[in-house]
């Protein structure tokens, strides 16, 4: 099989290369197929008859270089340089590469500058000459980023000079990708693959492009590359990296080890082993690898930069910062190192230091779009207000600070106290909470690019999230999102960021649900249909649902499923088991076993027990859904509404009952609609989404003026799904109408955590709290109204002054009343209050 | 400073003069659909009621609409072009010099080159036709409020000294249905627009209220605003988006109210007149102090402000007690 590929590649090589020496073509073909021993043998045989052939010497040297025999390789390149044949510039470039790999930068740089001079000095330049000049220029771009543009032009010239010389195109694609121009890189790799669809390095280039675009196709393409050349070290290293990102550490280690079998001194492959030893907490092995890498190249900053990069991807931000510091200490021109340092400093709340690091990085590599975006975001930080209070440092946009600040401090403090008790732990530093009114800014803060589909992120001591202004009205509950992220702060702090993703995410969703009725994710028909289809993962594999989703909704399903696992565990074993597991993750080398050990269960047993729990918890709904497991058929009911009567009996199928009820409701047949919607509710009482029976029945009862029944429906809806903004508002009205003002106020307080920018909401809330005599709450609502910049500011200041006066806060009342009268000096009610406040002063002084 | 003193005397003199009359013409345009017919009818009816409550004599209010309004007992008068022109002539014949004429257009509009038209049952009325209809009303203060889409060109066509022109949009290119009219009517029919708390809503206050609330409505829905209201009251034909008492536009609109001007009884005592003058002096002192706000230490500023405000509050009580 392998031989067949070699022959095919040989044919292609002859087709595609302008080189006319069949000996070189044959060696090249064997090299492309990864048959390095045969290629070396051929080269040596040919050299025996022609020892001064510089091209053969270069080929042999390159083969030695790729298989890690650096000393022998260097000797061949020097021989090539001493000969008078062609390919002198390539020999120099190769020799410089060896110096570079050994950390002998001065020697490498001297050679690169020599090579660049040839561009002016040599009268005629071959494609390989141009390639060598381009390669040298690319390296020199490190100190002068403008040279990258020269390198692109030179690679392009080399490619034009000899279109069959694919190495030039591949190097150009790699450079474009390195400089973040993936669109052109992808197009180029595809063009090259149209010429030779089995070129392993072109396939690897395409895989890297796909990875750049977060495409899961990257693994398949990398494997295609290795199918053609199983000894392609960069492909093995790339695959190892992909497996690390997917948390498939044993597969990653296997790939790195295979790479090292080909090239035992591959710095990149050794780096992957170092990353794995770090992530798997093999301290001794890590130190051994570190020593080995530093012995091979004492200035190899990429070792630490890569460690920093992958540590951050595994949420080990402190480690990432530490490694990035090492990278820039080792090589002050490691722009990647400075960038990683800056990003992780920002993640740890070191804003000024982070910004300075990013500026250093960007000065050296002005093409990095992540750094550019983040620096642009940092430029807006002066529009934000930072407030230190208790355990928190809250950063809000100036336009939102007055409104959101008062809610955030209160809610965050509640969450902190609650979790401090539950987890018996306190984070060791103040928590920084940042809210962004523009989703693109939050996205850049999270990942450096716009477009991330998250609501919040937790970096450890730093939480960043969308403010409610970043999304459309009612799109999410920012209060429960903040609660969720604060739960992560505790989880990460307790485990030194070593908690598995599924555990932390599931527990954080569960904490939301425990915090307040209706908060956190809820069960949906879609989730239960996925269960019935067998698409949900067992607990033992739940982490895959987060890091390796196989269908579009799997991440969302996994969040909810994981939260149910913790609900189940707390009910069955108590919260101590969860807390103990968190404490154990910090030092565990085998995170998969931690929870099982505390539960004293085998993995299969936990999977089976949870499955039973889920089946029991949703028994009714599962039965009703199991009869119509085809979600595509939900759009139309099986029975025509025109034929329906009170006597009509439909099977106990949830969607049939719901859809028929909905249609009848839309047609105005409220009496019949009610019957079917009630039946749907009986069949799936746990579901309270926007398209659920609760909301439909509430609207139906409102139309029928059956207010008590409408209120009951909304009560139940909100108890399950407190994110439903219109339901919260409607419920407040109904509760007010029925005289339960405290409950009406509670509904509006809940609505504030969904959409706090509604003037009427705060006006009603102030009014309700006034009726209840809760003057502190009235003042809060009045402050919110003022923060919303009403047209009638004098009235807003007056009302706030009034609330303060009633709450006994006379100094604030006096301050506010002056503001009111400053705007409207003849405002009679304000004048009366001012005189009353002044009149009360001597009495108050006397009382003291 | 000199101008300020003259203005003060003028303002002081006005309450004793014969009160000018306010005339209001409300024109409800063609709705096109039931939803808009209902919307425009509702706005017109609310405006009518607010005018009554503002003290405009009922015989000085004319309401023209596409169809009869359900909640008014007055006979229906259609809002076609001939009727509009006739009503404007009638008002012109009836109005005295210094009277104030308010015309409020509620409906749809559309651009016509550099011009624009307000849509009516039958032929529409263009901005230039409207301008012609106002010839002869130079002795009255005119307030024209066009709340329709594409109403911007009405400013260029109608602008003149002694006129306040308000449009819902900045140009004919803003031709989507507007929200501005709803909030403009709410400024008089609801609360929240009387920002200086003198218990009257000036045209400037109504404009600012409607503009701000319109923008808030778009912001709440996270939509780009498709209307940008303008006010012109200096006769230069250029509307301002943010007029103000001390801006190029807004000074006149700040002094013009839909409500009938309050008058001081002719037989008021000399003591009351003196107190009223003292009140105006205090108001002026507060206004002067506010101009120094940025140059004074904060505590000093508010201490001085409080002293003046307390004096004003006590004086206002006395005036009220004296029946002022």
Image (cartoon, coloured by chain):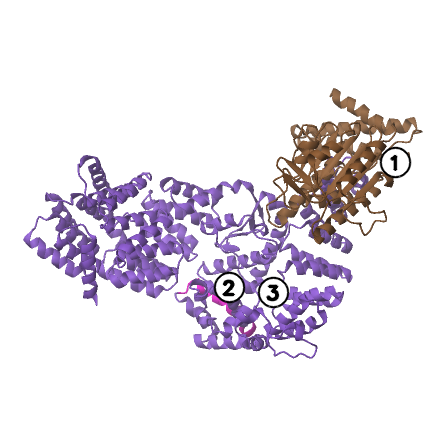
Chain colours: A purple, B brown
Query: Which residue of the protein is positioned furthest toward the right in this rendering?
Result: B267
- Residue A133 placement (x, y as % from top left): 23, 42
Query: Which residue of the protein is positioned furthest toward the left in this rendering?
Result: A49
Task: Report in which chain the residue with disc 2 lies.
Answer: A
Tell me how far mark 2 sits from mark 1, CA to CA: 67 Å
- Residue B192 placement (x, y as % from top left): 74, 43
Residue at the disc numbered 1: B320
Q: Residues within 10 Å of mark 1 (few under 14, many from 20)?
A: few
Residue at the disc numbered 2: A556
- Residue at image position (65%, 54%) is A752
Q: Is residue B251 magenta?
A: no
Magenta region: which residues?
A: A571-588
Residue at the disc numbered 3: A689
Instruction: Give the SS element for disc 1.
Output: helix
Q: Nearer the viewer, residue A526 or B280?
A: A526
Task: Report in which chain the residue with disc 3 lies.
Answer: A
Circles 3 and 1 on the same chain:
no
Circles 2 and 1 on the same chain:
no
Instruction: Give the SS element for disc 2.
Output: helix
Instruction: Give the SS element for disc 3.
Output: loop
Residue B196 placement: quadrant: top right
Would residue B180 appear left or right of A422 to someone viewing this image? Answer: right
Would residue A334 appear left or right of A752 to someone viewing this image? Answer: left
Q: Is residue A575 magenta?
A: yes
As drawn, A407 above or below A542: above
Q: Which numbered disc, 2 or 3, marks the residue that appears first in the sequence?
A: 2
| Image quarter hosting the N terminus of chain A | bottom left
């Amino acid at each position: 099989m392998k031989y067949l590929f070699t022959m095919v590649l040989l044919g292609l090589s002859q087709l595609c290369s302008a080189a006319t020496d069949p000996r070189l073509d044959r060696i090249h073909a064997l090299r492309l197929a990864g048959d390095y021993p045969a290629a070396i043998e051929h080269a040596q045989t040919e050299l025996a008859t022609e020892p001064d052939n510089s091209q053969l010497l270069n080929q042999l040297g390159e083969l030695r270089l790729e298989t890690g025999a650096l000393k022998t390789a260097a000797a061949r390149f020097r021989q090539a340089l001493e000969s008078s044949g062609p390919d002198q510039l390539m020999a120099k470039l190769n020799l410089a590469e060896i110096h570079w790999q050994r950390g002998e930068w001065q020697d490498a740089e001297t050679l690169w500058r020599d090579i660049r001079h040839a561009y002016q000095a040599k009268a005629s330049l071959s494609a390989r000459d141009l390639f060598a000049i381009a390669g040298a220029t690319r390296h020199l771009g490190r100190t002068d980023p403008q040279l990258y543009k020269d390198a692109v032009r030179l690679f392009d010239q080399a490619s034009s000079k000899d279109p069959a010389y694919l190495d030039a195109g591949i190097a150009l694609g790699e450079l474009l990708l390195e400089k973040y121009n993936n669109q052109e890189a992808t197009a180029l790799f595809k063009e090259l693959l149209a010429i030779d669809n089995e070129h392993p390095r072109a396939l690897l280039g395409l895989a890297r492009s796909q990875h750049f675009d977060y495409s899961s196709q990257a693994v398949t393409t990398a494997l295609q590359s290795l199918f053609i050349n199983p000894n392609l070290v960069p492909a093995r290293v790339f695959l190892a990296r992909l497996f690390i990102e997917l948390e498939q550490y044993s597969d990653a280690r296997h790939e790195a080890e295979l790479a090292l079998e080909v090239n035992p001194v591959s710095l990149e492959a050794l780096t992957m082993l170092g990353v794995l030893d770090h992530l798997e907490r093999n301290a001794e092995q890590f130190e051994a690898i570190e020593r080995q890498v530093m012995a091979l190249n004492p200035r190899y900053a990429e070792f630490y930069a890569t460690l920093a990069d992958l540590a951050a991807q595994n949420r080990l931000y402190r480690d990432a910062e530490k490694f990035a510091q090492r990278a820039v200490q080792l090589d002050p021109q490691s722009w990647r190192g400075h960038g990683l340092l800056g990003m992780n400093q920002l993640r740890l709340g070191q804003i000024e230091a982070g910004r300075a690091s990013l500026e250093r990085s960007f000065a050296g590599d002005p093409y990095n779009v992540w750094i550019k975006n983040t620096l642009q975001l940092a430029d807006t930080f002066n529009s934000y207000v930072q407030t230190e209070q208790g355990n928190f440092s809250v950063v809000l946009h100036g336009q939102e600070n007055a409104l959101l600040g008062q809610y955030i401090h209160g809610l965050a403090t509640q969450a902190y106290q609650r979790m401090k008790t539950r987890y018996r732990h306190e984070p060791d530093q103040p928590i920084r909470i940042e809210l962004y009114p523009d989703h693109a800014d939050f996205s850049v803060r999270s990942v450096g690019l716009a477009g991330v589909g998250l609501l919040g992120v937790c970096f450890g001591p730093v939480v960043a999230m969308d403010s409610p202004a970043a999304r459309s009205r009612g799109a999410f509950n920012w209060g429960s999102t903040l609660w969720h992220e604060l739960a992560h702060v505790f989880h990460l702090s307790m485990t030194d960021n070593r908690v598995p993703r599924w555990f932390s995410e599931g527990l954080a969703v569960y904490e939301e649900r425990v915090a307040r009725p209706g908060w956190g994710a809820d069960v949906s028909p879609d989730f239960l249909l996925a269960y019935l289809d067998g698409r949900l993962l067992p607990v033992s594999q739940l982490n895959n649902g987060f890091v390796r989703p196989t269908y579009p909704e799997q991440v969302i399903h996994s969040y909810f499923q994981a939260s149910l696992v913790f609900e189940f565990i707390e009910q069955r074993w108590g919260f101590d088991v969860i807390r103990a597991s968190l404490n154990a993750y910090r030092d565990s080398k085998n995170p998969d076993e931690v929870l099982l050990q505390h539960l004293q269960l085998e993995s299969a047993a936990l999977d089976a027990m949870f499955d039973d729990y889920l089946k029991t918890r949703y028994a009714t709904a599962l039965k009703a859904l199991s009869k119509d497991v085809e979600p595509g058929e939900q759009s139309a009911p099986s029975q025509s509404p025109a034929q329906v009567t009170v006597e009509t009996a439909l099977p106990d199928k949830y969607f049939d009952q719901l859809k028929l009820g909905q249609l009848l409701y839309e047609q105005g047949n409220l009496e019949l609609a009610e019957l079917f919607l009630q039946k749907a509710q009986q069949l799936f009482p746990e579901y309270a989404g926007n398209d659920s029976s609760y909301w439909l029945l509430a609207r139906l009862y409102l139309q029928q003026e059956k207010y008590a029944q409408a209120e009951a429906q909304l009560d139940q809806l909100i108890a399950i799904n407190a994110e439903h903004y219109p339901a919260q508002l409607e419920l407040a009205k109904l509760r007010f109408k029925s005289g339960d003002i405290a409950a009406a106020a509670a509904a509006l307080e809940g609505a504030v955590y969904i959409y706090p920018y509604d003037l009427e909401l705060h006006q009603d809330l102030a009014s309700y709290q006034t009726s209840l005599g809760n003057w502190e709450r009235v003042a809060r609502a009045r402050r919110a109204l003022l923060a919303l910049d009403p047209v009638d500011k004098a009235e807003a200041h007056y009302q706030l002054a009034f609330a303060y006066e009633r709450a006994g806060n006379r100094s604030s009342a006096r301050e506010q009343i002056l503001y009111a009268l400053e705007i409207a000096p003849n405002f009679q009610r304000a004048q009366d209050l001012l005189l009353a406040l002044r009149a009360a002063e001597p009495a108050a002084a006397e009382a003291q | 400073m000199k101008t300020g003193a003259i203005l003060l005397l003028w303002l002081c003199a006005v309450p004793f003069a014969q009160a000018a009359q306010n005339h209001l013409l409300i024109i409800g345009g063609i709705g096109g659909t039931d939803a808009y017919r209902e919307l425009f009818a509702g706005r017109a009816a609310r405006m009518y009621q607010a005018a009554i409550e503002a003290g405009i004599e009922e015989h000085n209010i004319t309401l023209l609409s596409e169809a009869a309004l359900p909640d008014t007992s007055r006979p229906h008068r259609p809002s076609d072009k001939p009727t509009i022109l006739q009503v404007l002539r009638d008002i012109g014949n009836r109005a005295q010099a210094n009277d104030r004429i308010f015309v409020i257009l509620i409906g749809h509009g559309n651009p016509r080159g550099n011009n624009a038209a307000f849509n009516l049952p039958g032929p529409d009325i263009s901005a230039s036709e409207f301008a012609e209809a106002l010839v002869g009303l130079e002795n009255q203060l005119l307030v024209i409020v066009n709340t329709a889409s594409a109403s911007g060109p009405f400013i260029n066509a109608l602008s003149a000294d002694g006129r306040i022109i308000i449009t819902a949009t900045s140009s004919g290119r803003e031709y989507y249905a507007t929200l501005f009219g709803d909030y403009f009517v709410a400024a008089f029919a609801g609360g929240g627009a009387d920002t200086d708390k003198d218990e009257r809503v000036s045209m400037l206050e109504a404009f600012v209220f409607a503009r701000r609330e319109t923008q808030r409505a778009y912001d709440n829905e996270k939509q780009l605003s498709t209307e940008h209201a303008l006010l012109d009251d200096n006769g230069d034909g250029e509307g301002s988006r943010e007029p103000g008492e001390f801006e190029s536009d807004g000074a006149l609109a700040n002094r013009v109210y839909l409500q009938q001007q309050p008058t001081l009884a002719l037989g008021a005592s000399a003591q009351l007149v003196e107190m009223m003058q003292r009140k105006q002096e205090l108001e002026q002192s507060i206004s002067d102090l506010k101009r120094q706000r940025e140059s004074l230490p904060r505590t000093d500023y508010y201490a001085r402000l409080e002293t003046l405000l307390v004096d004003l509050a006590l004086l206002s009580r006395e005036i009220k007690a004296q029946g002022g």
